[in-house]
Image (spheres, helix red, strand yellow):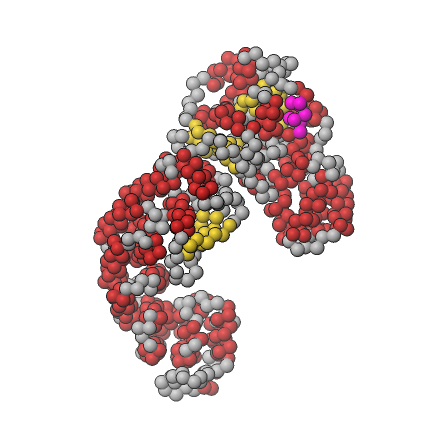
Amino acid sequence: MEDSQVHIIGIRHHGPGSARLVEETLALLLPDIVLIEGPPDANGLIEHVADQEMTPPVVLMLYSQEDLSRGVFYPFAEFSPEWRALRFGVKTATPLRFIDLPVAHQFAITDDREESTDFDDPLMEIARAGGYEDKERWWETTFEHRERYEEQREAIFTLMSALRDHYTVSSQRELLREAYMRSQIRAARAEGFTKIAVICGAWHVPALQTMPPKKEDDLLLKKLPKVKIGASWVPWTYDRLSLRSGYGAGIRSPGWYDHLWHHPKATTELWMVKMARLLREKGIDVSPAHLIEATRAAEALASLRSLPRPGLPELQDAARAVLCFGDDTLLAFIHEHLVVGRVMGSVPSTAPKLPLEADLETQRKGFRLKFQERREIIDLDLRETTGRAKSALFHRLSLLEIEWGKKLPASGRGTFKEQWELRWHPELHLKITEQAVWGNTIEEAAISYSRSEARKSHSLERLCHLLATLLPADLPSVIDEVIAAVTNLAALAVDVTHLMSALPPLVLTARYGDVRNTNTEMIVKLVEGITIRICVGLPAACTALDEEQSEDIFDKIKDVHESLTLLSDEALHLAWANTLTVLSTREEGGDFIGGGATRLLFRMQRIDEDEVARRLIYALSPGNDWRKAAGWIDGFLSGNAYALLFNDTLFALIDRWIANLPVDAFLSVLPALRRSFSEFSTGERRKLKEKAFAGRPTQRGTKDVPGQLDHERAKGSLNVIADILGL
């Protein structure tokens, strides 16, 4: 149905050339209504396009109010044809409507992640026929660079008509979409509009140009199911424009398309200037002569490739050869900062927001923080009211899995400082929407979510980690409930390893009371009770373990040990030291665990060098199996190079034991010894090699090894030690 009333403009989503086609056509046509392929569910939000605060790139985010985890994004850049149509409408007071199949129906009849390939495959075949392996490149060269836009409009219609005659649209979703768009065109005509402009993807032009009888579309659209939909404007970024949206749009080079939009003339020269400026900021020497030579190279490549002018591939090839001196790393830097770009849009404060999102926006402004994609590191002083409040906000967001901030590991043992890495991803808006079911404020939602987790979780470790976040999140109203759940699970726990996994987060939780003035008495008592139960049950849990099981449980032993050193409770330290003593002296404890427990006791200063040497002599005595001896050494040396670097007695004992091993025994224990030494840093292994080849030093204050050493025989072990160290 082609008549004087309906003017269909087929475009490529986010195409600068298509955007100019739309602007030129609308300016000449001066329609009395503009219909745009887009979600009618968001028609009420079009008015915000006129706001001065609205700066693309932005997206319309639509989500199911019945299942907030389901959402879809409709992105707009400044060079998007749909955005130019919207801007034309608000500037000229022309009515605007989105006319795609409502998302309310799409979510009800199909998975929102389904994507039709009807448009992709035909264009790919046409591109290949034209000698291109990239349909984006083909489309850009064929249509986007044309300056006679009416000619472009007719060419697109002819091409798509031929393709639609050859390819049958089989997707039910696509058939419904086109039927609905036709119904909206008919509705506009019925309302008395006489100049109707329709902006749609080029693939749909033939389906809207020649319409079937109205009753066929009505029958297809009759009684479609629907769900309740919410919608809002959300800031977006250029690197997110590559994401697939509700209408399948996506581009790989938004920064380049932005350049094409703003600089249709002298495109090559100005792009070279941008690259030069970027490289100079990085300290790369780029002269005017380089720019002239790179421009000539790009134009020569375009001529050789039979192109009307250089495109992005020609500019990249020229930049690699002339500006980047063949360095692909510099070219990747240009791609990230220029070809893709780091532009982030903004939406007006008047645009509708969910209460949860509005609360976050209020707090963000109050703390003078920015939503930005660039990483930002901030330091918080928890002795200050503002520092504690910011920390509470970030921890509450973490509880809700809204990962705006990532807490960095603390350096040192102080509790009054925190460091956070902030980085905002636009997709977090959808996560906020998903978590809005828990409450209208961040605090309310975090409390409700935590209560739900506490009631349904049967994992002691999960609850302890939850508790560890609740305290710095400053949510006292739910802490008692979680503590009760932890206490009940801990009382029923029969596996000591579960208690060991739960203890570290509990200890960290107890420490927060030092600076936050929070009463952690109940948590401290819980820590005491769990520690005692670990001390009682651990020796039995370390019985009859294989090598892998020994390593797994010793990892938990180290975590418990590190946690308890953070507490100033001598009674707990003594109980833990007694437990380690049992593990280090009983054969049932396993040789790996015995060696590791000895090292921890030495670090606690519960045993001295003489006692460590005595235990090592016993472990390495000829009466013991050499496999057990290797296991003891593996546990003792695990990540502990200093024991060998600064203790000549231990070094000499292990040196002599290795030198006296039979060949078969040595080959058997070599993997375990290699594993032990592989945990040392490169510098530590180098120093051990130097020490081994320097011979056995006799430094002042060192204790002699019991018995006489055969120095000549010891020299033969040096190459063996070097082999163990992998040097």
Left/right of residue 364 with respect to residue 91 in the rendered view:
left
Q: Nearer the viewer, residue 317 or 467?
A: 467
Who's the residue at 24% across and 55% down the image? 494
Residue stretch rendered in magenta on the structure: 20-27
Q: Nearer the viewer, residue 286 or 617?
A: 286
Left/right of residue 456 with respect to residue 300 in the rendered view:
left
Left/right of residue 34 with respect to residue 286 in the rendered view:
left
Query: Residue 699 in the image: x percent, y percent?
Result: 44, 84
Who's the residue at 31% across and 41% down the image? 452
Query: Residue 526 in the image: x percent, y percent?
Result: 25, 55
Who's the residue at 41% across and 69% down the image? 640
* Magenta stretch, main secondary structure class: helix
- Note whether 246 is above or below 503 in the view shown: above
- Image quadrant in which the N terminus is located: top right
The answer to whether residue 313 of the structure is visible from this angle is yes
Total residue callouts: 0
The answer to whether residue 206 of the structure is visible from this angle is no
